[in-house]
Image (cartoon, helix red, strand yellow):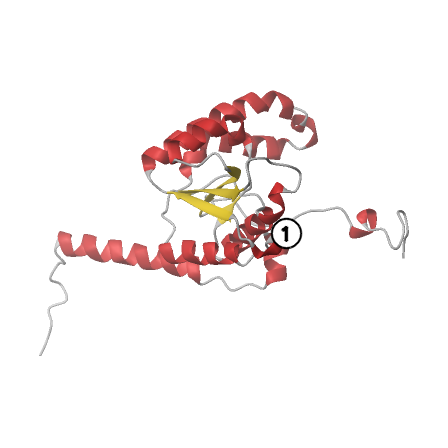
Amino acid sequence: MRYNHSVPIPESTHNLLTKQSQKTTIRERTMSEDISLFDAMSTQRAIRNFKPDPVPQEALNKILEAASKAPSGTNRQMWHFVIVQDAEKRAKLSDIYRRAGRNALPNLQWLQDANPRILRSATHLIEHMDDAPVLLLACIEHGGETNLTTGSSIYPAVQNILLAARGLGLGSVLTTFHKQYEDEVREIFGIPDNVETAALLPIGYPADGVRYGPTRRKPIEEVTHWDVWGGRK
């Protein structure tokens, strides 16, 4: 049997195939990264500029699973993670971050000389947080009072989130500006008073031109002390 390959594909079928192809490409791009832990740690950097492409549920599940494997004091696992994908709620949370970030900008102007790239990147996120298709609130339940060690069991989980995102080809960054208006955040999402929103992380695919590491850090010789302060090898 011969087929007439010149017969055009109906527009509805073409659109369906295109959408399916786009979904497959997004999923493959997300799940196909296979890098070592040390590669992830060496190349994970703050990503503040995102594409609007959706993050597949499978990727979010892997990120949350990684977060749940973090160390936890006495294994109490008092962490909670609020995933914000709804456009209206993302807009409300982004507005809070925008107001808080604008409040903080005057204190960041020293970066204009020290590292203008970081200042531009931070300013972009302040104005465009809702470009990220996912916002994640990392929360920690406590007994009603917070202290220096309150974050000891949530920030290791946050680091796992950042590394897992990097391993899946996604970008993120740890932010805390929203805490200036934490009561508003609690009201929007129904968060109890005994739960602190320790960090707000946008998650998404890095925008075109935005790259991962390698990260630039001080030599370990400058920050390592052997046996006593100032001890060198």
Task: Pick whichever, 222 or 155, lies toward us.
Answer: 155
Q: Residue furthest front?
A: 143
Could you say which quadrant of the image residue 151 lies in?
top right
Residue drawn 31% across the image and 56% down it: 23
Label 1 belongs to which residue? 214
Residue 107: image location, x then y, percent: 64, 23
Residue 118: image location, x then y, percent: 61, 35
Above or below, comparing residue 69 to residue 194 in the picture? below
75 relative to 203 in the view: left or right: right
Secondary structure of the residue carrying tag 1 is loop
Kind of residue sitting beneath label 1:
Pro
Above or below, comparing residue 71 to residue 85 in the picture? below
Residue 204: image location, x then y, percent: 44, 46
Residue drawn 58% across the image and 23% down it: 105
Residue 229: image location, x then y, percent: 88, 47
Task: Pick whichever, 173 or 93, lies toward us.
Answer: 93
Instruction: Report the label total.
Output: 1
